[in-house]
Image: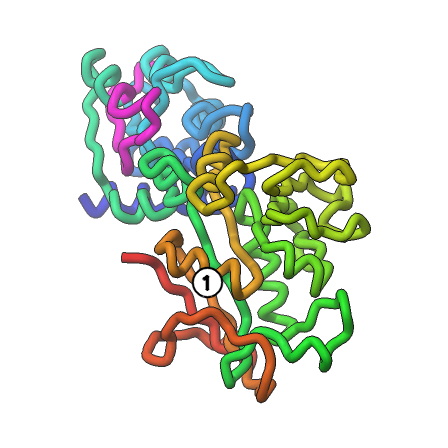
Amino acid sequence: MDTHIKYMKRCIELASKEIGNTYPNPMVGCVIVHNNKIIGEGSHQEYGCNHAEVNAINSVVDKDLLKESTLYVNLEPCNHYGKTPPCTKLILEKGIKNIVIGSKDPNRNVLGGGINTLISNGCNVEYGIMKDECDFLNKRFFTFQNQKRPYIILKWAESKDGYISPKKSDRTQREVFCISNEESKKMSHNFRSQEQSILVGVQTVIDDDPELTTRLVDGNNPTRIVLDPNNRIPSNSKVLSDESKTIIFSSTKNLELNVDNEVINQFDLDSILESLFKRDIQSIIVEGGAYTIQKFIDSNKWDCIRIFKSEKNLCDGLIAPKYEIDELEYNLIGDNKFYEIFKS
């Protein structure tokens, strides 16, 4: 069992390097072991490209060793034709008899079918190795498949005295006011690069005119989503640039917009999340404003909350979303306290 854990950890390590790159597919790493030595490894790097098992098998120099080897993978091999052929087919063709799996794939196209196919063709299959860790790695994919909605992260920065922004009279119009330090801002942009989309309410666009990109780090820009029920978004807003795709949700069509504008008849979170699910968006990071974030909290529609708490005092302004953090553990990012809370 210790040996299984050693190689499954390597699968998780390989897979986690691809965070943000594989949507809408999950993150998968694979290693092939012969006589307690890794002879091949690989990961799924991009949707439509080879799966991890294919890359690992292709990396093995002496293919004759495959029949005497064990294949480790953090997620059940696929058993259906999609953008690529089923991995079970290749595993069987190469004569690999021993397979160790972390998570079962919740996708209805797989759902134990990969394991059953391998077993019915004479393979020795063990699964559930480091299951909790493997499930957590693909929490976005699992939430999307099981709950039929995106994985939801709420993120904000607040002052020491509990404000997310000064009074409007004390700040420059249409300019982002930064509470967190430079290190925390880079960390936030790295978080953006890991998610498929980023969501804000229209008031944040009106007040701050944010870009909602990953400009401070090297990473993919998420799809930008703006909740604008009454068509108030200014036509010169930075979120309407072509740096990334933008979706505007509104109650009626905004004829001035030259972006994806979806009309929601019943403008509520359930309808919005249902629409995002239909668009195959697996994850969203909600960055503002306080009203929008509080809606998600009050509706209990979140999976993770991230808060940067500054040492600055604002004394007055826009009150931060209400979530009790005083007794929670935190990490220091410079002089900022960083809280990360996962729903149990």
49 relative to 334, above or below = above
**How far from the left and from the top, in percent, is residue 100?**
26, 32
The image quarter in which residue 216 lies: bottom right
Q: What residue is shown with label 1?
A: 294
For the point 55% across and 24% down, the residue is 48
Which of the two residues, 92 or 28, is positioned nearer the viewer here? 28
Which of the two residues, 23 or 133, is positioned nearer the viewer here? 23
Find out whether residue 210 is within the magenta segment. Answer: no
Q: Is residue 97 left or right of residue 189?
A: left
Q: In this view, does 95 lie to the left or right of 56?
A: left
Residue kind at label 1, given as amino acid type: Gln
Specify start and end residues of the magenta stretch as a single range.
94-114
71 relative to 214, above or below = above
| Badge 1: residue crowd in 10 Å (few <14, some 14–19, many ≥20) | some
Q: Which colour scheme is used?
A: rainbow
For the point 57% across and 51% down, the residue is 199
**How far from the left and from the top, in percent, is residue 114?**
29, 21
For the point 59% across and 36% down, the residue is 263
The image quarter in which residue 341 lies: bottom left
Q: Is residue 251 among the parts visible in the rendering?
A: yes
Q: What element carries label 1?
A: helix
Q: Is residue 61 among the parts visible in the rendering?
A: no
- Farthest residue in the right direction? 236
For the point 65% across and 79% down, the residue is 167
